[in-house]
Image: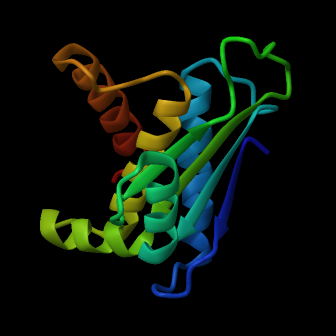
Amino acid sequence: MAVLVADLQDVVKIPAEQLLLLEEVGNLALRLEGKSLACEVSVVLVDNDYIQELNFTYRGSDCPTDVLSFNLQDNNTALEEEEILGDVIISVEKAQEQAHAYGHTLQREIAFLAIHGILHLLGYDHDTIETEQEMSARKELILKKFKL
């Protein structure tokens, strides 16, 4: 299995169908980038306290954020058939706030954040207008495939 999903928070009940959807969305993102399903990405759902601690520890920002990506590959790592790409950590509380603010479902927001994080693991970024547009187009393509 390429995308492993774990729900470590108990603030918002996430149905099993939504966890399965995250696996499917992530697997499509990997396939579109030519990655084998033998590679691995973890998507972990957490609360604001958990992500705030990570955000402070690794980014020096003492506030909760919506998503963090931890890439386990570097330029010195030999790519293997069964490579572990990294972890995507999503705050369900922040996702719920953003879904409400943007007027869409929590399911869509969490899927959006999962795709965003996975694309970062695959080398996408949004440092320039061009790279942001490329990343946004990829996210929208995947969301449309799942009618989100």
On screen, residue 12 versus residue 45, left or right, reads left
Q: Position of residue 10 (x, y in %)?
A: 55, 87
In depth, the one of 129 and 13 nearer the eye is 129
Seen in the picture, residue 128 relative to 92 is either above or below; the reply is: above
Asked whether residue 146 is in view, the answer is: no
Asked whether residue 68 is in view, the answer is: yes
In percent of the image, x 36 and y 36: which residue is there? Answer: 139
Colouring: rainbow
Q: Position of residue 98 (x, y in %)?
A: 23, 65
In percent of the image, x 55 and y 58: which residue is there? Answer: 21
Dividing the picture into quadrants, the one containing residue 100 is bottom left
Q: Position of residue 133 (x, y in %)?
A: 22, 23
Q: Position of residue 105 (x, y in %)?
A: 29, 69
Seen in the picture, residue 101 relative to 73 is either above or below; the reply is: below
Q: Residue furthest right?
A: 81
In depth, the one of 113 and 46 nearer the eye is 46
On screen, residue 85 versus residue 97, left or right, reads right
Seen in the picture, residue 84 relative to 35 is either above or below; the reply is: below
In percent of the image, x 33 and y 65: which residue is there? Answer: 63
In percent of the image, x 79 and y 45: which residue is there? Answer: 1
Q: How many marks?
A: 0
In depth, the one of 57 and 140 nearer the eye is 57
In depth, the one of 112 and 121 nearer the eye is 121
